[in-house]
Image: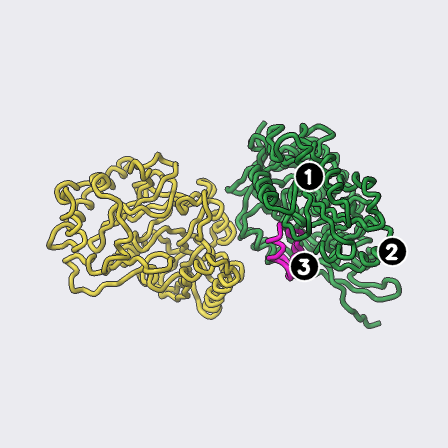
Amino acid sequence: MSVPHIPCLRFGEAYRSFNESEVNDYRDGSPKATLSQVNAGIIRRDLVQIGKAREALARFSTRELVDISAKAGDLFLNEDLPLGEGSMQSAQDYLETLSSTSGLPHVMVKRNMDKIHYALTHVELILNGLTRGINFDILDQGHGEQAGAPVCFYPTTDALGLVMPSNSPAVNSLWLPSIALKIPIIMKPGREEPWTPFRLIQAFIAAGCPKEAFGFYPTDHEGAGDILRLCDRALIFGDKSTTDLYAGDPGVQVHGPGFSKILIGDDEIENWPDYIDVMASSISDNGGRSCVNASAVIVPKYSKEIADALGKRLGPLKPLPVDDPEAVLSGFANPKMGEWIDAALDSDFEGSGASDATAPYRDGTRLVKAEGGTYLRPTIAHCESMEHPLSNREFLCPYASVVEVPQEDMLRAIGPTLVVTAITQDEGFKKQLLRASNVERLNIGPLSTMKISWDQPHEGNMFEFLYKRRSIGVAA
Amino acid sequence: MSIEEQTKKSAELLDSHTAEMIKWHFSPETGSSFWLDWAKEQDWNPLEEVSTFSDLCQKFPNFQDEWLRDLPNEVWVPQAYKGKPFNIFETGGTTGMPKQRIGWDDFRIDYTAFSETLNDEHFPRDHYWMMVGPTGPRRLRLAIEHLANERGCSCYFVDLDPRWVKRLIASKQFDQARAYMDHAVDQALTILKHRSVSALFTTPKLLEALAERKDLIRSGIKGVFCGGTTMDKQYARFLVEEVCEGGKIGFVPTYGNTLMGLARHHPIGPDNDYSIAYYAPQPRAVLRVIDPESNEPVEYDTWGRVELTTMTKEFFMPRFLERDEALRRKPWSEAPWDGVAEVRPFGAMEKNIVEGVY
């Protein structure tokens, strides 16, 4: 079968560049698609005309776009959709191809597909959460009355810029509400994951969304920089260095490492064996690749015992065939990344203050070549304190530290944290948690850190990012 | 005449020109002290052993461009030019002591010849040009003015110092680099607003920036003469189809430098996938695409290192290895000798190179 070509999309129209990159199988490197790479000037020129994309979306009501989103969700999950020039892709093709280039087992790709489907078919619920119940008519008109008070909103940008990652398909769910909010997207897809955004765009178009709303620009560093610079609102995904680069820029929402954590209070610590399941799933679901995966377990005591129990649970996990429904580990699309993480972990374990609790239960090395690809087996680090460099790290694999910290010091010690699951019934501790300014999402009780609520934004509110409220007066 | 016959004829012309230049530069009455001294140190005599261009390629080693930086300019003065003040032109955008080439009339000869390749539709005579780009100590500044004058035009200038831009980029001061570029573009837009200009000479990036802020067609621009940085197929297509609106503005890419002069381009378009091939102003300058190990030209349409030989009465520079690589292209009826296509910095595919930012 010939290798499909995925073009750039300029206002939804395919544009084939002379410059192409390959999206390769994570196992043998064979090309699964070629991808048009465009120069930054193309993006800059299109942004000059972005008004026509806004106008195309403005012709629809929010209700219509919510319905189109739901239909797009069903098409995305089930139907054949265009892939590149003249070829079609079934849902199963998408699942298998994405698995073959990302290293995600089929079962995880399917879970990601289901998440995206849920998000698209529940845009109304999501908008309700984002806007705190603003009536759609008010969104369409730009002003109106809500709960007896006049309200007026204006868009902060003509386009939402997106510099996407390659690590997890479900991150695309973050931009989906933008379409119903009538803001076009200008996207640089992840170099190794064009599949999901391209399929989503095709699903939207097939569902009746105006194609002008979609800019899909595989591009270089300059192009990515221009998307961030020229779209008044943009999302970027990256590591801490990226986060630091855009910190303080109100136009750029940075999605970096989550450093999500599980905290157990003094009142529940004696019951720790009951919570091993929730800890293990928080650490290892989705291959440990999400920012909402727990990367630390903070406890007032029994840290060694808990680390050992997690080591015993996660240590034996090994790569399975991609189509095995029990598969929990993901291969690395870029094997060098796996090698780098393995070397970084080895280096940090060399000094004192931390030990590898998974090592006794892992037959063989952490880094393995299996199923034709490169994998990292889970790692639980028992750290003697939060001072140790491994205590608050995040890696693209199932990894977590287990650290003893007195309850009264926990919130100060954890630093900025995307999701905290706090296992406690202590009202005083709960109050402290509710007051904590360094926690984006708080789960109280034994809930997985992976559990998020679609009607409550856990990492920036897309509506408040794309719209601002202003005061308005209208003469009678 | 067939292209084969044309190619043969131009090769013969090149051989006779080579012989003439060897005689000029290695005769005590006309040659420069550098080449006369150099010849004394060799165990062979250029006057006796080089009578064709092929001989030159076999006998001469690669020209060392450090000589142009380290030696005083006087050593390059041919006897025939002694006592006549010369222009000093500098190359490149690097820091430290620059390489220099001296000259008298070469730039006029080169650019007068180049003028013949421009058409009057896109580069109308008796009007105004504007150059936006590196002026300063570069040969280009005088050359462009001469080219405009040659066509009955006068030229406005907006400077941009590439050495400063490269320093800003190297130290990751991207905002400053952008601000400096905006500063150059602002000045150019001011000229366009207040004066009538029909032809532009600029760099691709500055052209893009100008076009993003001003409708160049409505501003009266009819032709753009563009050079200085890498233009791959996609970028050339973008500049032609979008920035120059599919030919409404004539787009003339050039490849040149202080050491060579100006190479003309083969017309580009969808037929040849916008692959820009340049042809040196032979016989005054010769471009080969070679395998540096074997010193032999690579096969047509394959990649090799660009090698430049310049042979004028003012300057002799045999077999200088450029820092570029290119595809070797076949002779063309308008320039029946080898061309160099899709020129890019040598090793560009393997590493990031600070290039093409201005």
Query: Which amino acid type is shown beneath numbered disc 3?
Result: Thr
| Residue A357: assigned label | 1
Task: Chain letter for yellow, please.
Answer: B
| Residue A157: assigned label | 3
Image coordinates of residue A117 in percent, x first then y, are: 76, 41
Earlier sequence position, callout 2 versus callout 1? 1
B356 lies left or right of A384: left
* Pointer 1 local density, CA inside 10 Å: few below 14, some 14–19, many at least 20: many
Report if residue B247 is visible in the image. Answer: yes
For the C terminus of chain A, the image quarter is bottom right
A39 lies left or right of A207: left
Q: Which color has been applied to chain A in this rendered view?
A: green
| Residue A427: assigned label | 2
Instruction: Tell me the SS state at disc 3.
Output: loop
**Residue A382: in magenta span:** no
Chain of the residue where label 2 is placed in the rendered structure: A
Image coordinates of residue A12 in percent, x first then y, are: 64, 46
Image coordinates of residue A322 in percent, x first then y, are: 67, 30
**In front: A364, or B97?**
A364
Q: Contact (CB < 8 A) between labels 1 and 3?
A: no
Alpha carbon distance from label 2 to label 1: 33 Å
| Residue A339: assigned label | none
Instruction: Give the residue drawn at x 77%, y 52%.
Output: A441
Residue A200 is drawn in which quadrant? top right
Residue at the extreme left: B29
Instruction: Tell me the SS state at disc 1.
Output: loop
